[in-house]
Structures are given as C-alpha cells and as structure tokens.
C-alpha cells in the first residue's frame, strides 16, 4: 500500500469519529437544556405577554423545586414588588435572606437592598432605613443604599440628615448643591414657623453659600425682613433674584410692590415693575399684580401691558383676556348691549381658566395650579416652571 491509499482509508475514519464525538456533545447539551425547568421558558413567555401574575406563579413553582436558584428568587421578589404586591415581595426576599443557598456575602447584601426597597414601597420607612444603614459600608451597594436613604430623609422631611447624606454622596459626577440649598431653605421655613428668625437667616445664608443661584433663599430672606418690618432690605433682597434667575421674578414682583406701598414709595414701585415688564416681556406676571396696578397707572397703560403680555405669550392669554374684558366692562365707554355680550364671554373664559394648570414639571410633565419647589410626582427639585402654553 502506498501512503496516498492509506490516507484515503484513514480520513473517513477520523471523520466518523469526529461525527460521533459531535453527536455525543450535542446530546449532552440538549439533555442539559431539557433539564432546565420548562416552566422557566413559559414564565418568560408570560412576561413578554405582560401576564406577570401567571409568570410569578410559574417562577414560584420552580423555586419550590429548585431552592438553589437564589438569583431567580431575588428576581421573583422584584416581580412581586413591581406588581405592587409588597407583602409577598417582603416574604420572598426575607425567606431568601435566611436561605442556606445564599453563600456569597455580596449576594446577601443585594437581597438586603431589595428587601429595603420592598419595605420602602410598603411604607415601612423605619424598617427600610434600618436595613439601608447596614449597607453603608458595603463595597458594592453603599452608594445605592445612601441614595435611597437620601430619598427617605426627604420624604420624612428630615432635612438635617438629608444634608449630611447629600454631602456624603457628592462626587465629581454630581454635586448636590441645588438640593442642599433647598434643604436649608426648608429648615429656614421650619425656623420661621417657630418665629426663630435668626435661625432662619443663618440657614438661608448657608443655602446661598451652597448655591448662590438659590432664588428661593432670597425669596424667604425677603419675607423674613418683611416680618421684621425692614421693607428696604426686603426689596433689595428680592431684587437680587433678577441676577440669580429672572424667571423667578414673578414670584416677588407683587411682594416688592406691596413693600414699596408700605414705604409709601409708589413712584419707585411703578418704575421698577414697569422696568421688569419692559425688560422681560416673556415673564409670567400674575394677574393679581395687574389688578393692583389698576389703582396706580392709567387704563391705557395697563391695557398696553396686558396686550403685550398676550402678544409675548407670557402669562395666561385667556386669563389676561378676561382681565382686559373686565377693564372694558368697567369703563363707561361701552354701549349696554355690548356689556352683556362681554359678560357672557367673561363667563366662558372663567370656566375655561378654572381648568387650567398654571405650572408644569419639565421632568415628568406633572401639572398643577400651585407652585412646588419639589415636584410632588417625581421628587425633582426646581423642575416646576410656569405653563403659559395652555
Ligand atoms: Zn416631576
């Protein structure tokens, strides 16, 4: 036999061996795959179809048979929580925490974190707080635990702990200066309610040191001066807001006006307010201020301000229109039959205005008639802006 013939014989043998080896390999793979509980695939299908109830039942059955699948049990708890079944989520995660199959300390910490979230969702804030403080020194979960604690302190209006937690969390990625300044403003308001004006001032000073753009701190500081009857200082403080963020000016224009009136300085008041209206035609000035101005400036000037506001889409067009009609109606110039028509239009506008939301959150689109410094829906600070688009 020559070498070529030998190769011709050997090659198919190797091929056959390889083929058999391949077959055996494939068989093991398929066998192992079939050992994976069929219910797991069904559960995934149910999840895709948003049938989370049946999916969780399936996962629960698997875990009863395969308690070593700790990660699956962790996910099952999360699934219960997302369905709002907080009590079952708590049970599932507590059981997992005591499981003999939970060997890895890091995995344990993860379960503690999820359990804390369950307690938080269930409104059991103290228990959530207890668990989260256990994770403060965790290498992996410390940050997440501290972020949750910061939320809890804010919900509890525990501003002092919120400040220290925010300071701990401050990093090069995110400084909490907006939040910390707001927490100090909250403390200042608490102090004001207790008539502790000096303490209020010191919190406001801290707020401005933390965030010199904190307009709210100057709004409150002006209020403190006003209580102390220091109207000049109040006006000066409120005027600072123009440099901080002029969009907050509408929140103080009426206050400034009132303080000037207290000082009997009507001329100064008008110069400043007219200046703001001319310089910032897009400001949403409240109708109240226009109503007050009515007694001090002539009708034509007031009408031109109102018409400008409508033209510049500042303020609520329908509310301003209502006011314009009111001015016309009060004037002696209109014929009687027109007066009746105007009354009807006013009524229509008023019905419409009552349904309007003056403010909107730019983060979550939450709408409201009252202003909030912290959005009640998404808990973001300084995200609420005026909503003249309506
Ligand atoms: Zn929001």
Image (cartoon, rainbow, N blue to C red):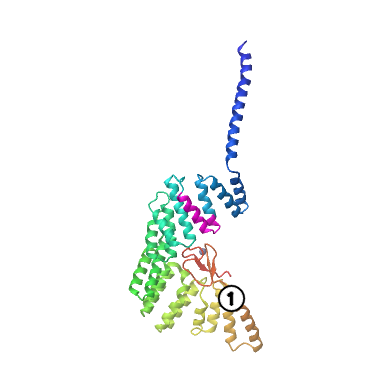
Point out the stretch of residues depicted in magenta.
80-98
Front-lying residue, 322 or 177? 177
- Snapshot quadrant of residue 199: bottom left
**Which residue is at 49% across, 56% downward?**
90
**Residue appearing at x 61%, y 77% in the figure:** 351
Q: Residue furthest top?
A: 1
Q: How many marks?
A: 1
* Rendered position, 221 above or below 18: below
Left or right, residue 261 beside residue 387: left
| 4 on left or right of 192 | right
Seen from the viewer's position, the closer of residues 371 and 52 is 52
Residue 107 shows in the view: yes
Residue that badge 1 annotates: 353
Which residue corresponds to the image point at 61% horizontal and 47% vertical from the top-left?
A: 42
Q: Quadrant of the C terminus?
A: bottom right
What element does badge 1 sit on?
helix
Front one among 95 and 121 = 95
Give percent across and percent down for residue 336: 64, 89
When asked about the image quadrant of residue 177, the answer is bottom left
Image height of 21 relative to 280, above or below: above
Task: Name the one closer to the observer, 199 or 78.
Answer: 78
Q: Is residue 367 magenta?
A: no
Quarter of the rendering containing residue 10: top right
Q: Position of residue 156 (x, y in %)?
A: 43, 65
Question: Most prominent secondary structure in the magenta stretch?
Answer: helix
Dividing the image into 4 quarters, which one contains the N terminus?
top right
């Amino acid at each position: 036999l020559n070498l070529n013939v030998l190769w011709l014989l050997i090659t198919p043998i190797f091929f056959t061996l390889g083929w058999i080896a391949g077959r055996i390999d494939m068989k093991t793979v398929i066998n192992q795959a079939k050992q994976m509980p069929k219910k797991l695939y069904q559960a995934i299908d149910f999840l895709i179809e948003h049938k989370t109830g049946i999916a969780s039942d399936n996962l629960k059955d698997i875990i009863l048979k395969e308690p070593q699948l700790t990660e699956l049990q962790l996910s099952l708890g999360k699934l219960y929580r997302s369905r709002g079944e907080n009590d079952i989520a708590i049970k599932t995660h507590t059981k997992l925490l005591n499981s003999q199959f939970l060997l890895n300390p890091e995995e344990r910490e993860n379960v503690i974190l999820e359990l804390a979230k369950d307690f938080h969702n269930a409104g059991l804030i103290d228990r959530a707080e207890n668990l989260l403080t256990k994770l403060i020194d965790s290498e992996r979960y410390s940050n997440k635990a501290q972020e949750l604690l910061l939320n809890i302190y804010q919900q509890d209006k525990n501003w002092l702990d919120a400040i220290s937690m925010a300071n701990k969390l401050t990093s090069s990625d995110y400084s909490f200066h907006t939040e910390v300044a707001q927490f100090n403003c909250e403390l200042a308001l608490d102090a004001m309610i207790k008539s502790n004006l000096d303490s209020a001032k010191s919190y406001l000073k801290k707020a401005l040191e933390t965030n010199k753009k904190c307009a709210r701190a100057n709004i409150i500081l002006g209020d403190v001066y006003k209580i102390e009857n220091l109207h000049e200082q109040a006006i000066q403080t409120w005027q600072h807001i123009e440099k901080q963020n002029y969009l907050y000016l509408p929140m103080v224009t009426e206050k400034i006006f009132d303080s000037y009136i207290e000082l009997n300085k009507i001329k100064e008041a008008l110069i400043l307010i007219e200046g703001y209206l001319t310089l910032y035609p897009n400001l949403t000035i409240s109708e109240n201020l226009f109503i007050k101005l009515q007694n001090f400036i002539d009708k034509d000037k007031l009408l031109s301000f109102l018409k400008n506001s409508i033209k510049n889409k500042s303020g609520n067009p329908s509310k301003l229109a209502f006011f314009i009609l009111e001015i016309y109606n009060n004037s002696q110039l209109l014929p009687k039959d027109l007066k009746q028509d105007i009354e009807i239009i006013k009524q229509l506008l008023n019905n419409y205005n009552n349904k309007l939301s003056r403010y909107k959150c730019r983060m979550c689109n939450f709408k409201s008639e009252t202003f909030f410094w912290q959005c009640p829906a998404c808990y973001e600070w300084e995200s609420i802006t005026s909503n003249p688009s309506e």
